[in-house]
Image (cartoon, rainbow, N blue to C red):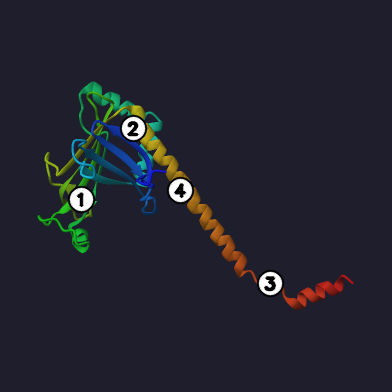
């Protein structure tokens, strides 16, 4: 087995000099983890990655996106936007890390701002979708939302061209793995509770047992 295999990887989709992979390591915190990256094969091995952005989508939000995909809503929206020349996102995720959390982790930005990470699913010009991830300076609102403040000049940028089928495979394979993980969590929890209940059940009363035994003779 390849020792460099990412054991958290569920599925990876590649495009020209870039890829997006789905990872299972954020399921315990109720998130789907998508890692976007670009690379340059002309660089030395170990130094080829040029951009790297980690996007975390809430499970409820992710499952709703899967619903739109399966029931045809996403395809309808895509066709409608392409016909009307509408380039606004079909889906958008705003996330990141606040300046306070960065400071506590010892990773404060030089500008003192929050770190914004965004993902957008856009209608593609040469394919069905363009799945884009950006990161850069952001600001934390009073409600805790981190909004980007990098305009059209993000510090990191990854744009992946995807067909409808490729995007579907990314989402649905991730959902299958989440459902399997959730089933395992419930199974483990039930086994633990059953074992606990068994251990807490008192043994039969000795006097009652002896009386019962006497009644047999």
- Mark before the other along the chain sequence, 3 or 1: 1
Q: Is mark 4 on a helix, strand or loop?
A: helix
Which of the two marks, 3 or 4, is nearer to us in this view?
Answer: 4
Residue at mark 2 to residue at mark 4: CA–CA distance:
21 Å
Residue wearing tag 1: 146
Cα–Cα gap, marks 3 and 4: 36 Å
* Residue wearing tag 4: 181
Q: In this view, does 197 lie above or below 60?
A: below
Assign a secondary structure to mark 3. loop
Q: Which residue occupies 22% across, 46% down?
A: 117
Alpha carbons under labels 4 and 1: distance apart: 29 Å
Mark 3 → mark 1, Cα distance in angstroms: 57 Å
> Circle 3 sits on which residue?
203
Which residue is denoted by mark 2 in the rendering?
167
Residue 181 image point, x, y percent: 45, 48
| Dot placed on the residue nearer the N-terminal end, 2 or 3 | 2
Nearest to N terminus: mark 2 or mark 4 = 2
Q: Residue furthest bottom?
A: 207
SS for dot 2: helix
Dots 2, 4 in contact, CB < 8 A: no
Residue 20: x, y in percent?
Answer: 29, 38
Q: Which residue is drawn at 20% across and 44% down?
A: 47
């Amino acid at each position: 087995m390849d020792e460099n295999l990412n054991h958290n990887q569920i599925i990876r989709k590649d495009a020209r000099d870039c890829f997006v992979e789905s990872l299972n390591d954020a399921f315990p915190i109720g998130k789907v983890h998508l890692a976007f990256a670009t690379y340059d094969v002309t660089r030395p091995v170990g130094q080829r990655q040029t951009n790297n952005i980690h996007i975390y989508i809430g499970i409820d939000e992710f499952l709703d996106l899967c619903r739109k995909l399966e029931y045809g809503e996403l395809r309808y929206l895509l066709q409608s936007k392409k016909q009307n020349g509408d380039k606004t996102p079909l889906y958008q995720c705003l996330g990141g890390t606040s300046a306070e959390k960065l400071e506590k982790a010892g990773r404060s930005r030089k500008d003192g701002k929050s770190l914004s990470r965004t993902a957008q699913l856009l209608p593609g010009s040469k394919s069905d979708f363009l799945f884009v991830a950006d990161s850069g300076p952001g600001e934390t609102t009073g409600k805790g939302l981190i909004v980007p403040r990098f305009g059209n000049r993000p510090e990191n940028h990854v744009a992946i061209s995807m067909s409808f089928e490729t995007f579907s495979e990314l989402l649905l394979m991730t959902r299958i793995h989440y459902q399997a993980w959730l089933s395992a969590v419930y199974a483990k929890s039930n086994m633990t509770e059953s074992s606990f209940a068994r251990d807490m059940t008192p043994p039969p009363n000795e006097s009652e047992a002896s009386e019962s035994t006497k009644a047999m003779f």
